[in-house]
Image (cartoon, rainbow, N blue to C red):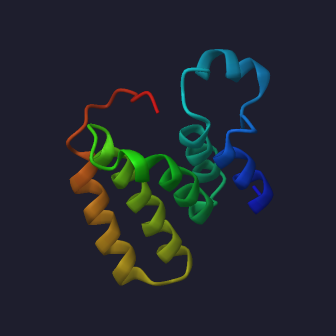
Amino acid sequence: MTRKVIRSILSGDLNPLTPDRATRDENYDPRYLGYFESFGQGLFFEAHEALEALWLPQRQGTNGPFYKGLIQLAGAFVHWQKNRPEPAVALFGLARANLRKYPATPIRG
């Protein structure tokens, strides 16, 4: 996913889903979906950027720690890709602490 595509997702101009998935997932924020799209492609920095735009205005809200945990998870993989295991392990721990507060059910982004 290129930076141009990420900017389109962040601005809300682009839904990263194919039409058949779009119907099923239309209630999700495109930035939330962009996170998983990028994450699934191993584009962890882009995943972090996509979700951070959604998290920042909501960081004190109910889903704030959930989004923060997902961002930390992506950040951990960025460090892992760059062969920096110590910061990666630290972020994995922070992500786990934030994400374990939530049930294994989808949160509407």
Quadrant in the picture for the N terminus:
bottom right
Q: What is the number of callouts on the image?
A: 0
Q: Is residue 4 above or below residue 67?
A: below
Q: Position of residue 45 (x, y in %)?
A: 58, 65
- Percent position (x, y) of residue 30? 62, 36
Tell me residue 89's x, y (percent): 33, 73
Looking at the image, is 109 positioned above or below residue 45?
A: above
- Quarter where residue 73 is shown: bottom left
Q: Residue furthest top?
A: 23
In the current view of this chain or complex, which residue is farthest to the front? 57
* Figure check: 89 above or below 98: below
Instruction: Determine the residue positioned at 75% across, 39% down.
Output: 13
Residue located at (62% from left, 60% from top): 46
Question: Could you tell whether 51 is left or right of 25 in the image?
Answer: left
Tell me which residue sits at (64%, 48%) in the image: 10
Residue 37, percent from left and from top: 64, 44
Q: Is residue 88 left or right of residue 5?
A: left
Q: Nearer the viewer, residue 30 or 84?
A: 30
Identify which residue is drawn at 45% across, 84% down: 84
Q: Is residue 38 left or right of residue 57?
A: right
